[in-house]
């Protein structure tokens, strides 16, 4: 985005203002740099309020098979941290952007080890924050410091297993939004949306920060239910990556895949909006 | 990067230094979903392993003796001693049930899982040694067990797949990436995330997030505990050196642990030099697994440690003729002991390891694992180069080589090694 | 033929009863050329083994401990104990170096040959277990070694052929007859006749001419010596029964020897029932190897003993799914103990042995040899039939089953055994 | 032979009278009963002074590959101890016949175990004695007794390794002739004739009984040398069995093989005769 669409410092907070934010994820560079640019922009056109841009890491420990394969495609097409930053600069969207990656890439970047160089460069290209799935609050000290230094947010993931002390520790350190993991397991689109979501949202009732729910959201109906359960936003990855993968495998024209992504985005955003307007449906009627 | 530069980077954590940190290495770099499980495990580790609550360690010691076959002997290698003009002693972990040191850890962890009330065991395996050890321990202790193994490894290690199945374990092929150990670990972590509440993940080496490196070391430390006592009673004192091969580093840490305070005992960790120490950055491939010698600091599979990575921080594929050493990382404590200068990292290439395999087999009547053959390869190279590795050395025989026969024959032929016995008459079969 | 008829035949020899005779069995039925070698061996056996001349037995005991991994544990089998409602203990000879009790004997004999000043070792092998043990012992003691092995066995036991070669032994395929153990023994006897002055023949079981049966038993007796002490200290007393599989009978005699005077301890020798106890006289084939149960007295491979023969006295081919039990004779002392009523001969068929193999593997995390699985098969059948085999039984785990994987998978599939794990998903392989 | 050619009680002694006796061996029933009859008779025509008739045993521990294969062929064509005795009865030769077999067949024969029944039947069909390669003097008590009872001879083999006490024990028990094993190893025709022969004959110098040398004699020249070294007879097995085997493999007419056998017998007998007329040639000229 670079100079075309510099987001405001409170851009993330703004993104969650209507309490039904749609937060899509794509792996950057999947299947190629150029295609990926189109796809991310399509999501923005489809109504994304904030986008999680995946910087591919060779050992995506927290991802399900769909995103693992996306990561592999992206790495094979030559994606690197430097290219990733260029990508962010090249993007023509005006929603806030968050980088989702694994800690080793953040740690190794730049002339000296440690997260500073990476965060500085991220700030430079206009990223708003980070989601780092293998960095629990206990290990996040150095990255938290660097983010504070450069004015970026550090999002934590709250899992169904997270309770007690750990929740409090995270509340103290989180910024931007909190990523509420809807159920156990790695990422991946599922047909059901877990009962655990409500429990998790209940545990976070006192938190000031927006609560975005992810893991397993696949369609508008899911989005609606999650939203109705009280989420401030819905995070969707695998269901979108599936469209990219399909387009790649079936050799569809880039425009067609981009259109499908945009349509899917619209469906999800609409679902989220509907959810905030209705009472929660009973889970077991 | 110099030590002082590192310090300036100010990497530090919020935990006490004793708590899963080995100098600058260690930690718990895992998905949030696993953190509560690690806390639970830390607690169990402290209570059962460190404090022997409910007699856990007594039961472990009884079972590793009566089921596992401990203590293993420390035996003199007569012909190697003669060959190298020094006293060579062998710590015989190849005699442990299952054929390698791996059971020490697997039995300890499966027993711990039982004490913790877990209902199910999962584990990753590369060559299949840790998988077979875990399957054996799980069968022995009546725990359902699933093993994750890369598809490539499933196909090339069929006998070990069969052993696991025969012991009642499920084997789940992992169809990702190259289909080897690295992918199997990642997949097992994912599976653990999905089922963490009732499942324990038995990690196969001194790697992964705290408390695994410390806990696995403690289960393996029985090696050096015994060896140190045996040396005192059989040799009349401590050895001058202990030599051990290092993949993830569990047999190494096990063989070194009780000698670490004995500063006169030199400790050599022998890594796989593979076909070369050069790396192919472009392809993301290291034709070796010499992490301690050539790698640098990073975060992999839950820990900050030394690893093989490209300049961007992407993990490189490692390569070694020995599947059990073929891993891109190494345990954080071992990385720290190397930084401290307490452990000397060395490496031996594929060919030297194969030659050592044959030499030890014909000299001593012991068929060492290809992993172990690296340790013997270093003994040979150091002796040939008249390096001062001391009068009396202990080599840790981490496992037996029955599992490696096919690989050895193939690789030996490919290289035309002269030291090796001729197998050709048996290749074609032939009728009566 | 009744006992009294036998007595009327008046078979007797000119040697004292203590001298190689076990009741009506034993002796030295060998070509004249070998007789001086047997005399020399008798002399060496008496001096070195029985009288510990030059500290022979001290060295043997040291080496079988430090090289062989003795003592082996006596461990409780928790799930089998529960399953059968009795205390089941396992004597773990599978943990001996090489994977079976065979090394106890091979190491003893190769060491004896060294003390006798012999320059070369020969041995026969069937499944390859004795051959690999002998090759290991010979490498360890720096003795040139040649192994004779039937061509059929060479082809179906390739991993063991490779192990022998890797330990530096020559392997000579025997292209005679069916190309199995019987032919290999005959050929090794012939080779011994040719080179008897500088060569020692390491027989692989308690068979052959005196002093082999007594000598092999003495080297194997370490099993019952340990087990008896372990039972006293771990179980607080002697077991009610000891169960052991019997091919030639060496692990059996080893496991029984020190219990023979303990008349309250029942001794069960479990033979291979094969596919049936019926014989095909016409074809000269017994579809089993149940020598003690179905055979009768005769002379084979140097000794008078019980054997499988047709009505003319021609030796019958034996058959068993387990190569190590697939032999037409049995040791003379074991035959005698059966005649005396001290040892109870029983047998278990191929299918029951395979089922036991799987049961023990999944219950206990120990993969027993197919030979050993017969002993477990009897434990199962006796328990199912509520036979009174006692409260506390020891099963001698003569060896590990890694060597048997291919056979077990094939035979299990052929029979469609339900108790067995499904291997089919791994059969086809499959890419990434 | 039965009633057609009953040999006299001292028939074996008579056979060795000219001190250059030719003693051939064949496996009875190799390759068939009928052929085997022709072949044994051919040897008699060729000048055999005494014939060793092999009763095939399934584990021929002392034989080399040539005789092992003959034994296998004979067993496959249905040879049994009873058929063997019938064979002896059917034979039309008038030289003494000795049965060479392994102890288990002798031991198992007849309604009760032990050697009596076999020896009785052997005497019945007119056999003169036994050679039993797996029965050393120490184990021979029962057979020796039975032979005495029925007036048959029991031949022992003296090996190059046999010395001292054992020789004396054997001298006390042997009858008929002594089989001097020319060299170590199993039977089988060899090109060389061992130096050990002379040493063995020297050790037996004081024995009254005829000394027949066997193992490795292949042709007339060997026969001559052995004979010249002082042997009272030469025993030839494998070199003759080779002719049978060849005839069988190449499908020669029975008569042709019989002729070859007869010719070979004549060569060997002539060699033996020549040997007694000459001084021994030096072994290493
Ligand atoms: C026999 C043997 N030695 C060594 C290793 C390397 O592992 P570690 O370094 O953890 O001991 C393995 C791993 O499979 C092994 O099987
Ligand atoms: C494991 C095992 N058990 C038993 C046997 C049978 O031999 P024995 O009866 O002499 O113990 C063998 C022979 O190869 C064997 O390998």
Image (cartoon, coloured by chain):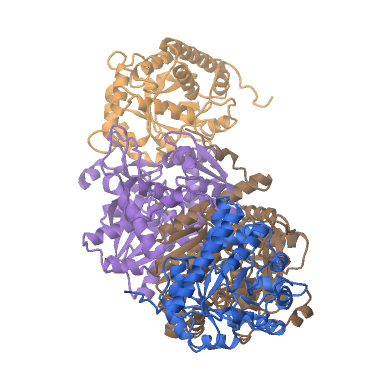
Chain colours: A orange, B purple, C brown, D blue
Q: Quadrant of residue D172?
A: bottom right
Residue C347 at what x, y percent from top left? 71, 62
Return the x and y of residue C191 as percentages of the image width and height.
48, 67
Ligand 2's quadrant: bottom right
Give the tally of numbered discs: 0
- Residue at image point 53% right, 50% down: B431
Placement of the N terminus of chain C among the 4 image quadrants: bottom right
Query: Where residue B430 sits: x, y (%)?
Result: 50, 49
Q: Is residue C313 above or below residue A255?
A: below
A202 displayed left or right of B72: right
Q: Which of the 4 quarters of the picture holds residue D1?
A: bottom right
Q: Is residue C110 visible?
A: no
Q: Nearer the viewer, residue D122 or A100?
A: D122
Q: Does residue C58 lie above or below B114 as drawn? A: below
Identify which residue, C297 or D157, lies in the foreground: D157
Question: Would residue C291 appear left or right of B319 to someone viewing this image?
Answer: right
- What percent of the width, then of the height, locates residue B99? 48, 57
Q: Residue at x 63, y 52 (%)?
A: C358
Residue B313 visible in the displayed image: yes
The front one of C284 and B85 is C284
């Amino acid at each position: 985005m670079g100079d075309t669409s510099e987001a405001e410092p409170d851009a993330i907070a703004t993104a969650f203002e209507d309490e039904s934010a749609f937060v899509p994820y794509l792996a950057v560079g999947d299947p190629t740099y150029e295609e990926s640019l189109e796809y991310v922009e399509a999501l923005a056109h489809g109504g994304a309020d904030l986008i999680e841009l995946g910087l591919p890491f060779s050992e995506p420990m927290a991802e399900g098979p769909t995103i693992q394969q996306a990561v592999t495609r992206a790495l094979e097409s030559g994606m690197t941290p430097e290219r990733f930053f260029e990508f962010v600069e090249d993007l023509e969207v005006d929603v806030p952007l968050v980088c989702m990656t694994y800690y080793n890439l953040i740690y190794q970047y730049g002339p000296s080890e440690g997260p500073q160089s990476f965060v500085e460069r991220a700030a430079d290209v206009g990223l708003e924050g980070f989601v780092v799935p293998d960095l629990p609050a206990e290990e996040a000290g150095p990255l938290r410091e660097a983010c504070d230094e450069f004015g970026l947010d550090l999002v934590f993931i709250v899992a169904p297993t997270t309770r007690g002390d750990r929740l409090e520790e995270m509340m103290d350190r989180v910024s931007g939004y909190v990523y509420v993991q809807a159920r156990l397991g790695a990422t991946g689109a599922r047909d059901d949306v877990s009962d655990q979501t409500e429990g998790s949202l209940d545990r976070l009732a006192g938190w000031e920060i927006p609560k975005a729910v992810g893991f397993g959201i696949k369609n508008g109906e899911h989005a609606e239910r999650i939203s109705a359960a009280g989420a401030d936003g819905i995070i969707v990855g695998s269901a979108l990556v599936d469209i990219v993968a399909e387009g790649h495998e079936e050799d569809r024209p880039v425009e067609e895949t981009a259109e499908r992504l945009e349509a899917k985005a619209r469906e999800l955003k609409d679902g989220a909006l509907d959810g905030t307007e209705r009472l929660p449906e009973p889970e077991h009627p | 990067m110099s030590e002082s530069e590192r310090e300036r980077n100010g990497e530090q954590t919020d935990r006490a230094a004793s708590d899963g940190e080995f100098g600058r290495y260690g930690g718990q770099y895992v998905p949030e979903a696993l953190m509560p499980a690690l806390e639970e495990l830390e607690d169990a580790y402290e209570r059962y392993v460190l404090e022997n609550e409910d007699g856990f360690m007594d039961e472990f010691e009884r079972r590793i003796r009566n089921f596992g076959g401990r203590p293993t002997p420390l035996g003199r290698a007569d012909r190697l001693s003669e060959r190298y003009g020094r006293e060579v002693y062998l710590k015989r972990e190849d005699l442990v049930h299952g054929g390698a040191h791996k059971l020490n850890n697997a039995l300890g962890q499966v027993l711990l899982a039982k004490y913790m009330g877990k209902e199910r065991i999962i584990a990753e395996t590369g060559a299949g040694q840790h998988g077979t050890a875990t399957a054996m321990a799980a069968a022995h202790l009546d725990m359902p067990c699933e093993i994750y193994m890369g598809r490539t490894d499933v196909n090339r290690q069929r006998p070990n797949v069969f052993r696991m199945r025969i012991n009642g374990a499920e084997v789940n092929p992992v169809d990702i990436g190259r289909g080897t150990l690295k992918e199997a670990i990642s997949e097992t972590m994912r599976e653990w995330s999905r089922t963490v509440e009732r499942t324990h993940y038995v990690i196969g080496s001194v790697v992964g997030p705290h408390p695994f490196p410390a806990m696995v070391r403690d289960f393996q430390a029985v090696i050096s505990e015994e060896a140190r006592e045996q040396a005192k009673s059989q040799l009349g004192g401590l050895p001058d050196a202990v030599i051990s091969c290092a993949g993830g580093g569990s047999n190494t840490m096990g063989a070194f642990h009780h000698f670490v305070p004995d500063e006169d005992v030199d400790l050599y960790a022998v890594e796989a030099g593979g076909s070369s120490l050069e790396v192919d950055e472009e392809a993301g491939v290291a034709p070796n697994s010499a992490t301690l010698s050539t790698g640098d600091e990073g975060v992999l599979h839950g820990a900050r440690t030394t690893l093989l990575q490209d300049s961007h921080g992407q993990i490189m594929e490692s390569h070694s003729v020995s599947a059990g050493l073929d891993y891109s990382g190494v345990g954080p404590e071992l990385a720290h002991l190397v930084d401290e200068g307490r452990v000397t990292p060395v490496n031996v290439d594929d060919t030297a390891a194969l030659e050592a395999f044959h030499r030890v087999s014909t000299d001593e009547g012991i068929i060492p694992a290809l992993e172990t053959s690296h340790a013997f390869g270093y003994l040979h190279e150091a002796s040939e180069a008249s390096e001062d590795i001391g009068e009396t050395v202990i080599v840790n025989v981490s496992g037996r080589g029955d599992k490696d026969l096919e690989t050895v024959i193939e690789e030996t032929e490919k290289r035309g090694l002269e030291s090796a016995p001729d197998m050709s008459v048996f290749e074609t079969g032939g009728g009566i």
